[in-house]
Image (cartoon, grey):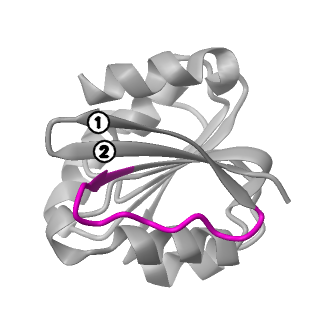
Amino acid sequence: MTRQAIFNVLGESVKDARICDLFAGGGALGIEAISRGAIEAVFVEKSKKVLWFLKENIAGLKNVRIIKGDVFTVMPRLKDKGFDIVFADPPYSQGLAKRLVAVVAQNRLVKVGGLLILEHSQRDLPDVPQGWEKIKTKSYGESLVTFFRRIK
């Protein structure tokens, strides 16, 4: 339900986009983006168990890459990559949303005009970094999805 809602908001902006899926898990968001016309997807995941599942899920897809590692360690390696869309669904129980938004902004993972879509709990409300705007927040039970746009 949440994934469908995210892509309803994104609409045609996914077509020809370069995307990054942080805390990728099984890769559902990135795979959905590829199926809707994204031209490149980078998946970041650290769990060895989940990586096997992710590899199976993306087998046969073109222009996809998996980076194994902790998101916060990997992000500096992706600095200035200028993704059109970055998806992030960090674990809720660890209070990572606020830190994640700040580090994405600091490393300029998203190009100017691009989007960060963050799934987070209602107890972990991120700040809007300088040079960004919050477009909307949608509630899905205990989960929130916040859409940020980089404006500078």
Secondary structure at badge 1 equals strand
Q: Quickly name the residue at label 1.
A: 139
Question: What is the span of residues highlighted in magenta in the rendered image?
Answer: 119-131
From the viewer's side, name the closer residue of 15 and 134. Answer: 134
Q: Quadrant of the N terminus?
A: top left
Q: Position of residue 139 (x, y in %)?
A: 29, 36
Q: How many numbered marks have been drawn onto this rendered protein structure?
A: 2
Residue type at numbered disc 2: Leu
Q: Is residue 47 magenta?
A: no
Q: Position of residue 92 (x, y in %)?
A: 20, 63
Please report the residue visible at 33 percent of the width from the left and 53 percent of the height from the top. Answer: 89
Q: Quickly name the residue at label 2.
A: 144
From the viewer's side, name the closer residue of 93 and 138. Answer: 138
147 with respect to 133 (left or right): left
Please report the residue visible at 64 percent of the width from the left and 45 percent of the height from the top. Answer: 115
Q: In the figure, residue 50 lies in which quadrant? A: bottom left
In the displayed structure, 97 sits above or below 146; it is below
Q: Which is the main secondary structure of the residues drawn in magenta? A: loop
Q: Position of residue 91 (x, y in %)?
A: 22, 64
Instruction: Verify CB contact (< 8 Å) between mark 1 and mark 2.
Output: yes
In the displayed structure, 53 sits above or below 11; it is below
Dot label at residue 59: none
21 with respect to 131 (left or right): left
Which tag, 1 or 2, sits closer to the chain's start?
Answer: 1
Q: Position of residue 53 (x, y in %)?
A: 20, 47
Residue type at numbered disc 1: Ser
